[in-house]
Image: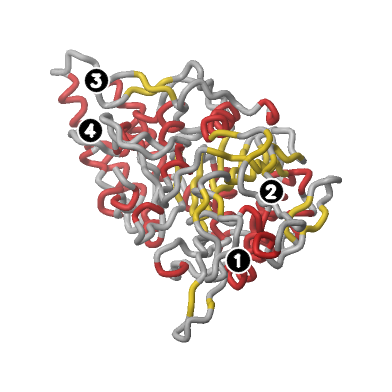
């Protein structure tokens, strides 16, 4: 089910405790579906989608010796890792390059906008089994939650009016594995607004009475098996962990300032995501609260440029980069620094990417267009050996010339960091057929082992 059709849970639906065991997919059903085999390790992922495809040659793969129409106005600066340079507009990230790994040679990108590949690592294509589920839904199916009071997969993604920008959702795994999307007013649904614990206990007692009645006629033992999931459902509603993580008024004010804040109602260029650095802080707090996968979309990076009424270029890519780069530099560096300061860097993996790269040559509209030949990604944490660059492009950042990295390899790495072996683990499609998690025989990146 496309995420653009997935709406936050209403308070009414969230509190329909009396119907939990009376049929239909419910909160206990969701918890039961997520409770799969495997240990409850604290391994986790924060996936940051830069909506629309960021310009790799203006951020992490600068080519200062290329012709001016390729190089652009930005200059590279040295990082705290000798020999690695990135854009001068990203000085905070330059200071923590030892905590980052940059993939400069990501290949196999689609040419048009489609967030699916960013979220599940597969080239967008129609499947008789339905859309392939995104990483968070797969992890919810395979690993289940770390903590029963916090869903395995929480999405902080804003719904974009341009459909292809939205996350693909649970696909053929079905609605039980859709992410929890507590955006906007939905945050209030995480607590018992207007319902006392005593009243909830009364509903729980009533439910048990129904179950006792039905258990006498239940020859399959299904009712007994549901008890633990009902307990988890009540625990989720009476716990404040999730709601507290989402409530930045309870965060340290210094933390909020370090990340920065943006307008959640302003979708960049009208159809992108808002430029909200506070989403990264919220993601960190959700990981600390027990979420296993947090996905978020950030701003809009589809900068083709434009012309004014007189035909002269305006809204150039460089004006947008001057706006976006410092804000992004601030919030991403704060997130990575926090992972290390809080001892999360061994368990939590951060990955940042967009749909594709950008054309080497700057257009007449002072923009860069779609370029599927090569893309970049930034990773941090996960216990990986960082402070390195993987792969390289040619002199104009147009093609990968060493160590081309495929999306399957990147996602196999993410799954490995979660303790999931993509060569062994499968998920069933709608026909019950086992499907591997990545295309082909992709293996995790040896450079990040």
Quadrant (top left/top right/bottom left/bottom right) for the N terminus: top left
Q: CA distance from mark 3 to mark 1?
A: 53 Å
Tell which circle, 1 or 4, labels the residue nearer the N-terminal end: 4
Instruction: Determine the CA span between mark 1 and mark 4.
Output: 48 Å
Sort mark 4 into few (<14), some (14-19) or many (20+) by Cα contacts within 10 Å.
Answer: many
The residue to which callout 4 is attached is 21
In the image, which disc is placed on residue 324? 1
Q: Earlier in the sequence, mark 3 or mark 1?
A: 3
* Residue where numbered disc 3 is placed: 222
Q: Which mark is residue 336?
A: 2
Q: Callout 3: few (<14), some (14-19), or many (20+) C-alpha neighbours within 10 Å?
A: few
Q: How crowded is the residue under tag 2: few (<14 C-alpha within 10 Å), some, or many (20+)?
A: many
Alpha carbon separation for disc pair 3 and 4: 10 Å
Mark 2 or mark 4: which is in front? 2
Relative to 385, residue 239 above or below:
below
Q: Please name which of the two marks, 1 or 4, marks the residue nearer to the observer.
A: 1
Coordinates of residue 381 in the picture (x, y in percent): 67, 39
* Mark in the foreground, 3 or 1: 1
């Amino acid at each position: 089910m496309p995420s653009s059709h997935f709406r936050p849970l209403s308070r009414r639906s969230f509190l329909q405790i009396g119907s939990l065991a009376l049929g239909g997919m419910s909160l206990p059903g969701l918890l039961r579906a997520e409770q799969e085999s495997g240990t409850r390790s604290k391994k986790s992922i924060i996936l940051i989608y830069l909506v629309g495809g960021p310009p790799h040659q203006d951020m992490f793969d600068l080519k200062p010796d290329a012709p001016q129409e390729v190089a652009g106005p930005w200059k590279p600066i040295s990082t705290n890792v000798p020999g690695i340079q990135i854009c001068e507009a990203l000085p905070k990230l330059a200071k923590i390059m030892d905590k980052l790994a940059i993939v400069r040679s990501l290949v196999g990108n689609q040419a048009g906008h489609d967030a699916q590949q960013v979220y599940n690592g597969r080239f967008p294509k129609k499947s008789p089994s339905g859309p392939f589920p995104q990483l968070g839904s797969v992890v919810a199916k395979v690993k289940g939650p770390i903590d029963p009071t916090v869903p395995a997969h929480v999405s902080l993604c804003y719904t974009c009016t341009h459909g292809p920008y939205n996350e693909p959702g649970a696909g053929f795994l079905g609605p039980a594995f859709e992410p929890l999307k507590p955006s906007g007013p939905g945050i209030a649904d995480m607590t018992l607004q207007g319902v006392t614990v005593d009243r909830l206990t009364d509903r729980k007692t009533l439910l048990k009475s129904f179950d006792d009645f039905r258990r006498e006629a239940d020859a399959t033992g299904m009712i007994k098996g549901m008890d633990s999931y009902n307990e988890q459902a009540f625990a989720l509603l009476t716990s404040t962990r999730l709601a507290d993580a989402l409530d930045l008024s309870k965060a340290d004010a210094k933390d909020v300032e370090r990340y920065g804040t943006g307008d959640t109602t302003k979708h960049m260029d009208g159809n992108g995501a808002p430029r909200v650095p506070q989403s990264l802080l919220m993601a960190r707090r959700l990981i600390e609260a027990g979420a296993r996968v947090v996905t978020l979309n950030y701003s809009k990076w589809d900068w083709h440029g434009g012309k004014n009424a007189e035909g002269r270029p305006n809204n150039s890519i460089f004006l947008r980069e001057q706006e976006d780069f410092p804000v992004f530099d601030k919030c991403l560096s704060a997130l990575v620094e926090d992972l290390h300061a809080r001892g999360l860097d061994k368990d939590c993996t951060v990955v940042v990417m967009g749909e594709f790269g950008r054309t080497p040559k700057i257009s007449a509209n002072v923009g860069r267009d779609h370029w599927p030949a090569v893309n970049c990604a930034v990773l941090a944490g996960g216990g990986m050996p960082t402070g390195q660059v993987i792969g390289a492009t040619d002199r104009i950042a147009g093609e990968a010339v060493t160590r081309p990295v495929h999306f399957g390899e990147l996602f196999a790495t993410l799954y490995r960091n979660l303790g999931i072996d993509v060569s062994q683990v499968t998920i069933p499609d709608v026909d019950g057929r086992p499907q591997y998690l990545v295309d082909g025989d992709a293996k995790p990146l040896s450079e990040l082992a």
